[in-house]
Amino acid sequence: MFTSVYTIAVIAIIALMVFGTLMLAINRYKTCPSNRILVKYGKVGPGKSALPIHGGATFVWPLIQQYSYLDLTPITTDVPLKSALSKQNIRVNVPSKFTFGIGTTEELMNNAAIRILGLTPNAIEAMAQEIILGQLRATIATMDIEEINADRDTFSQNVMENIESELKKIGLRLINVNIADITDESGYLKALGEKAAAEAINRAKVQVAQQRRDGETGAANAKQEERVNVADANARAITGENKAMVVEANSKADRREAEADADRRGDAAEAVQTAAAQEAGYKAEQQAEIARAERERATQQADVVVPAEIAKAKQIIEAEAQKAQMVLDGQGKGEAIKAEMSGQAEGIYEQMAKKADGFKAIVAAAGGDPDKAATLMIVEQLPKIVEAQSQAISHIQFDKIVVMDTANGDYSTTANWLSSITKILPPLHEFANMAGVELPDMLGKVLKPEQVQKKVADKQTSSTSVAE
């Protein structure tokens, strides 16, 4: 029994410790709303004095860490700046309102956690107001009073840049600047306002005068335009009436022209119809004549053309038969001629073969020398050659020969003439040389010209001696 009580006690203590730990964890787990910054400080990390968190949640360890909140609600403060010295050494009053709040960037949250954590909103407002007053005076000192009064946007921009750079050092950021009014103690701005008002009044008077002048000029121009428009309207009316009359006249002319054209087309249509009827009649007669001509042509063809075609076909058949007969006759004659020519060719072949055998015998008789054989054959033909030479001058007839000889030179003119006559005949040796054959010495030799002259001279000398 004692063991059971002890076990129950241990279990209860363990359960109590677990429950206490759970409640402690729940109690130390902190969430951060969106309009606040949770600043955890204590032992938060090396080199850090605070750890700001915007949104989310974090666990705050007991004993070694604590936490606090910074409110992000914007703060609006009135800054009644008076007697601020401008660049022109004119003191001005610039009452304004500034709206600022704690920034949510990491740099601004760290600065706020270090500088203003634990301060009340009033203390934060007082601190920011002192910074704003100082920077506002510094900004006014760099600008002319005309710039401050006339260009409010530039003035506000300069103020925001200068003041926000100082507010960031304590974790604040400037949200809005509202300059209420700018006045000065010397009345300079009032004088500028009166000058601007006077200039505006003068410009307004000038504009009123210009408007009156423009109104009177416009009225005169309107009257002039009215008269011109009336005259122009009258002229257009007269022109319109004239055009209408012209249109009416053209319409009547068109109507008469259309009527005449209709009459002309009607007459033409009647003539066309009449011509068409006549043409149809002519065509019918033509068709009848063509039919009669076709009938006559058929009759003539049956009586004349058909017999002629039959006769023509008969003649063609007969001509074809004659042609075939002539072809057969030609073939027969061709065969006969072929046989005759073949017989002649065989005879010539036999003749030439015999001659070849004879030439072989002549060459053999000449001791196998072809040149000597050729010489023997030429010698055999000498009678025929001499006969041909004698026949060359046998037909020349001389009725009378008159010789007038001067006997100048080595021999007489008569001798020259006879010598030239004989030279007309082809010399035997030259004829043989042309044939490529050299004649034997027994047929004579060819003398050179000087040998011929010598022989002639010798004959003349011998003749002279006989005469003496």
Image: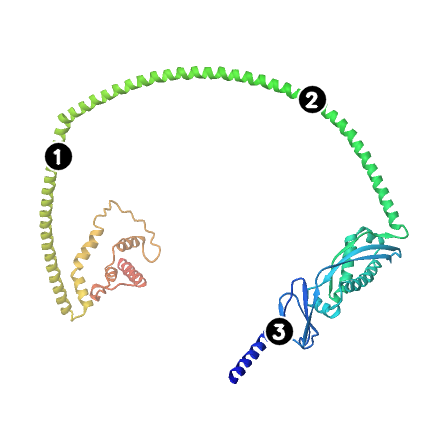
Residue 321 x, y percent position in the rendering: 10, 40
Q: Residue 454's mark? A: none
Instruction: Locate residue 73: give its quadrant.
Output: bottom right
For disc 3, the marked residue is 24
For disc 2, the marked residue is 230
Q: Residue 313's mark? A: 1
Relative placement, left or right, of 355 versus 458 is left
Q: Nearer the viewer, mark 2 or mark 3?
A: 3
Question: In front: 104, or 291?
Answer: 104
Q: Earlier in the sequence, mark 2 or mark 3?
A: 3
- As measured in the structure, the alpha-carbon distance from the residue carrying label 2 to the one carrying label 3 is 103 Å
- As measured in the structure, the alpha-carbon distance from the residue carrying label 1 to the one carrying label 3 is 144 Å
Q: Earlier in the sequence, mark 2 or mark 1?
A: 2
4 in relation to 153, above or below: below
Residue 237 x, y percent position in the rendering: 64, 19
Relative placement, left or right, of 233 versus 397 is right
Few, some or many residues within 10 Å of mark 3 (<14, 14–19, 20+): few
Task: Name the residue type under label 2.
Answer: Val
- Residue beneath the point at 49% across and 16% down: 255
